[in-house]
Amino acid sequence: MIVVTGATGNVGGQVVALLAAAGERVTAVSRRTADLPEGVRHVRGDLDDPAGLKDAFDGADALFLLVAGQDPQAILDAARAGGVRRVVLLSSQGAGTRPEFYRHPVAFEDAVRRSGLEWTILRPGGFHSNAYAWAEPIRASRTAAAPFGDVGLPTIDPADIAEVAATVLREDGHAGRVYELTGPAPTTPRERAAAIGAAIGAPVRFAEQTREEARAQMLGFMPEQVVEGTLAILGEPVDAERRVSPDVERVLGRAPRSFADWAGRNAAAFR
Ligand SMILES: NC(=O)c1ccc[n+]([C@@H]2O[C@H](COP(=O)([O-])OP(=O)(O)OC[C@H]3O[C@@H](n4cnc5c(N)ncnc54)[C@H](OP(=O)(O)O)[C@@H]3O)[C@@H](O)[C@H]2O)c1
């Protein structure tokens, strides 16, 4: 049995669907109610309350773990006590490139490495789905605002992250690996706005924000340290953040999906 945390999220929801479709027994954990495929067990749980996860972990072999909650060691101890032998951690590229800003993912990575479990760490860069932040303004006024409009980064499709996670959870041969997950090519925010315009068949105007405007907006939903790290990546990416990684293709045997592909599949959100 495989336990999937973050089952209501962009990535976790698709991990649950892929594992269930492959015939695995799945326990989906979330604080909110989740819309799940038939046959998937749901356990309401909070990663901030590892003792409350006992029921979820009982009889499990593997765990898909998000960075959430304050005590990764206690989560992993509870998982091991329930029978878990393999853990796949959804960390962040910033844990490698900007550890001073990404302390929470770094702490989870350290705990996973020390856990005694068979581990694999996934380090995605920015998600294609961060463009959902533009859904309401594009629907309302065909405008997309972002800072650093001409800085390109190889964002990744959350569906590809989920497919890598589901593969690594089920397959041997990934123990002790850290996979950097990116899309197939860098795109700039201006190009992403244009790709959404192409997907909905109507031009989308790109409005460049100042760093301060973007900072103020991000502080509404991210901790300050993560905001500073994110702005640094978006504005002054280092080579490791600009680079297209071969790891999605290594694991899946196919290239990662482009931003334009994601925009085409998700066009309804922007119409
Ligand atoms: N977006 C990016 O560009 C990016 C880049 C690199 C890494 N990441 C990492 O990827 C992760 C997943 O991204 P996503 O887009 O799938 O996120 P998302 O759609 O916002 O979903 C977050 C999930 O985390 C769960 N969660 C949050 N706190 C929890 C807690 N205390 N206990 C249990 N579950 C909790 C939520 O479930 P409930 O609220 O239902 O409990 C939800 O299912 C992010 O959290 C981040 O660490 C994101």
Image (cartoon, rainbow, N blue to C red):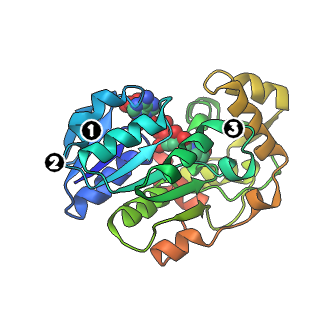
Q: Residue at coordinates 72% horizontally, 44% vertically from top-left? A: 99
- Residue 169 lies, in percent from the top left, at 36, 61
User: Helix or strand or loop: what does disc 2 sit on?
Assistant: loop
- Residue 126 lies, in percent from the top left, at 63, 49
Question: In the rendered structure, which disc, 3 or 1, sits on the residue that comes first in sequence?
Answer: 1
For label 2, the residue is: 38
Asked if the residue at label 1 sits under 8 Å from ligand 1, the reply is no
Amino acid type of the residue that numbered disc 1 sits on in the rendered structure: Asp
**From the viewer's perspective, is 87 left or right of 196?**
left
For label 1, the residue is: 35
Foreground mark, 3 or 1, reads 1
Task: Tell me the CA gap for discs 2 and 3.
Answer: 37 Å
In the rendered view, would you say 92 is above or below 231?
below
Q: Residue at coordinates 37% horizontally, 25% vertically from top-left? A: 49
Residue 220 seen from this side: yes
Task: Tell me the CA gap for discs 1 and 2.
Answer: 9 Å
Asked if the residue at label 2 sits under 8 Å from ligand 1, the reply is no
For label 3, the residue is: 144
Q: Nearer the viewer, residue 94 or 177?
A: 177
Q: Residue at coordinates 21% horizontally, 48% vertically from top-left? A: 37
Residue 45 seen from this side: no
Q: Nearer the viewer, residue 231 or 173?
A: 173
**From the viewer's perspective, is 138 left or right of 12?**
right
Neighbour tally class for label 3: few under 14, some 14-19, many 20 plus, Cα within 10 Å: many
